[in-house]
Amino acid sequence: MPVTPTTMKLAGKPARPARGRESGNLVLGSARTDKPTREEAEAAVRTLLLWAGDDPDREGLADTPGRVVRSYEEFFAGYDADPVEMLNRTFEEVDGYDEMIVLKDIRLESYCEHHMVPIIGKAHVGYLPSTRVVGISKLARVVDAYAKRFQVQEKLTAQIANSIEEVLQPRGVAVIIEAAHQCMTTRGVHKPGVALVTSRMLGAFRHDPLTRREFLTIVGNPSSSFGV
């Protein structure tokens, strides 16, 4: 029997927590193992197209359910990513370097878990190494690993900072995210040009005003321009 919106049996399926290994307060690699099939997902998109008032069988929409599902695989690849595994690949041959390391203006694309619309912005990540440093690309990958999930920005900021602190055990971690939320720029209050800024300061960045000021100086003033 072909899968259609009327034959899907997802409503009666009890919700189960995401499965993944735990590390302290982090849940990692938390892709569900009981998620719907691709056919069921495409049928759900057809239902949304019908609900919006269009005909999913017309030429322009006939292949849309498949395209949407394929795009979701990219948008939400973070559920299959393990930030701890990324950060565990460290090196110590830095000739005793122990000053601040900052990766700024990391492009960030996420999705609001309340309205399923984009959150577009940038992240600034800094840490004070203790004995180990990590490749700079890994910092960007950790941002993506958490961003490519349904999120709220406050939680996203904390997850990035907490994972770096837990794995690298540096003397301090700082994360700032500036982002525009389409849930308030294209709907609701309709306020374009508004940016939400969140921060998480741990260790020296929280307790040492000079360290915190140095990081903020490097990062610069928040901007609401994200090239969107």
Image (cartoon, grey):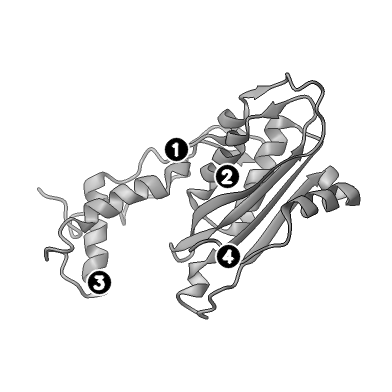
Tell me how far mark 3 sits from mark 1, CA to CA: 30 Å
Tell me if 172 is positioned left or right of 26 in this view: right
Question: Which amino acid, mark 2?
Answer: Val
Q: Which mark is residue 51?
A: 3
Mark 4 near mark 3, Cβ–Cβ under 8 Å?
Answer: no
Mark closer to the chain start, 4 or 2: 2
Q: Mark 2, mark 3: which one is toward the viewer?
A: 2
Mark closer to the chain start, 3 or 1: 3
Query: Which residue is identified by label 2?
Result: 143
Q: Secondary structure at mark 4?
A: loop
The residue at the point 21 percent across, 69 percent down is 50
Q: Secondary structure at mark 2?
A: helix
Residue 215: image location, x then y, percent: 79, 49
The residue at the point 68 percent across, 37 percent down is 164
Farthest residue toward the bottom? 189
Question: Which amino acid, mark 3?
Answer: Trp
Tell me how far mark 4 sits from mark 3, CA to CA: 34 Å
Query: Which residue is identified by label 1?
Result: 80
The residue at the point 72 percent across, 37 percent down is 165
Residue 6: image location, x then y, percent: 18, 60
